[in-house]
Image (cartoon, helix red, strand yellow):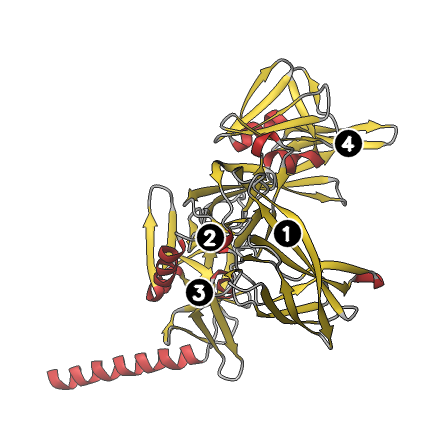
Amino acid sequence: MIIRKRVLILLILVLFLLSNIVFANDIKIGTVINKVLSTDIIAYINGNKIPSMNIDGYTAVVAEDLRNYGFDVIWNPIKRSLTISENITKNINPILVQNNENTVIGEKVADVLYTDIKTYLNGREVEAFNIGGYTAIFLKELETYGSVTWNEESREIRFISDKLGDNENEKNNDYFFKVDLISSDTIDIKNVDNTFTYNGEKVGFIDKQDNGYRCMISGNFLAERYGYNITVENGYYIFEKDGYSFKISDKNNEYQKYYNGWFWNEWELCQKPMVIDGEIFIYDCDLPGLFGLHKYWDPDDNSIRLIYNDYDVKEYGYFEIQGYKFIVKSYGQVQAVIKDRTLGFDDKYGNASGNSIEQIAYIQLEHPVNELDIALNYNGRILLLKKLTDIIPNIKTQTIEKERIVGPFSYVMINNPEAGYIEIENSDVYIDGEITSANGDSIVVEIEKYDDETKKFIKYDTQEINLKENHFEGYVHFNDHGIYRVIPIANINSMHGIDVNVKVFEFYVKY
């Protein structure tokens, strides 16, 4: 009798489990099976913020968002699978994470829907969720590619790739600055009857003029919001935070910027500020350049959105000198700006290029010994300023970019010389290369000779080499012993049918 009861109980359990399996397989795709909750936890992927959510008490991220953070996310519609794999070589384009002060922590923000899609990470199937047509995974699943750490005090969860760590160790010697976004603050300033308010507080107004109107926003409000100290000296309002400061006044539209008391530059505002009862109001178009923020205007209701980012800055101090070219690289979505203030000459600013995550700034050195200011600049706000002295050109480090684009249409390839600095015992140097969209049957070669007395290169001679069917070649001759700078110049087709002369490349010769 006891045995029969046990067999009967076992049979009932088997039937119950089978019924549950059948029931699970019968769930329709899109059926609500869970919920997504809002969270105050801040999630980071390799130092960059990523939008996150709370599912079952764990921090989750949208898989498709990982495409912006160094991952390939591949959808296979036939297999109905999503494959996530790390690709550290991809350009990083972080998604703006906005802080909403009205968010209620733990509040339902979306439904989790049933899906039959399989999600794989590093070849392993992971638990995934359908959130409004997107796939969400737990951030902890990324541990297969690195480390995931949780900080209870700051309420932050961070993923750091093992590969990124290796790369960063190698890159630390390559960058002058490295920056990480640590916070982003977004506020919407509403316009009601020509008065701007935030959370019911008056923070600005519309100043009507004969030629239009100005939107004036309280500098005192923004200073408090973004953590600036304000002092007033001789009619000037001085805003200061983390070493960066600027001075403005209602007497004129000029402003000056400083870092740790060092003067950086002086420019003009679009409009003079206004002071009312000791409170200074700033024209909204001048806010980005002063505070280094992003401003968006909503024409439908005349409201203003402001986004202010804070960054963690690391200085590694590495720079490179290629001949008379001084180069620094910065890592992060912030640009380095170089200024030459040597011997009291007018300020000269360098150039910059790069992508959203890696910037290259450079300047031509004008003097035998140079003094440079290097500022880490975010929308006009100075995050760090470094002063360098005794910067000396070095022609032996000159390089030649073998292939590049000059102008809008011309492609250049250099065959000879092979290096940017050469030493010769005879009096001739052979030049050979290709250039497209060039005019005429020759290329002009300008030659400058180094003068020991002035310590500068002075114009010495102009010669020509043959150009035929995009190929240029010929010998450049030197009559005297010395050090020379050689600059081949081509006439190329530019925009709108205009022809221009461009430097093809540059190299140095010691004869």
Residue 1 in sight from this viewpoint: no
Q: Earlier in the sequence, mark 1 or mark 2?
A: 2
**With 346 as the anchor, is 328 left or right in this view?**
left
Task: Answer with the quarter of the image where residue 138 lies.
Answer: bottom left
Callout 1 amino acid: Glu
Marks 3 and 4 sit apart, C-alpha to C-alpha, by 46 Å
Mark 1 or 3, which is nearer the eye? 1
The answer to the question of whether label 4 and label 1 lie on touching residues, with beta carbons closer than 8 A, is no
Q: Which mark is residue 214?
A: 4
Name the mark nearer the viewer: 4 or 1.
1
> 10 Å neighbourhood of mark 4: few (<14), some, or many (≥20)?
some
How many numbered marks are there? 4
Which of pointers 1 and 3 lies earlier in the amino acid sequence? 3
Judging depth in this view, the residue of 396 and 48 nearest the camera is: 396
For marks 4 and 2, give the CA distance.
36 Å
Q: Which mark is residue 448?
A: 1
Cα–Cα span, label 1 and label 2: 48 Å
Per the image, the residue denoted by label 3 is: 88
Kind of residue at disc 4: Arg
**Crowd class of label 3 (few under 14; some 14 to 19; many from 20; radius 10 Å):** some
Q: Tell me, for residue 48, which label it has, or none.
A: 2
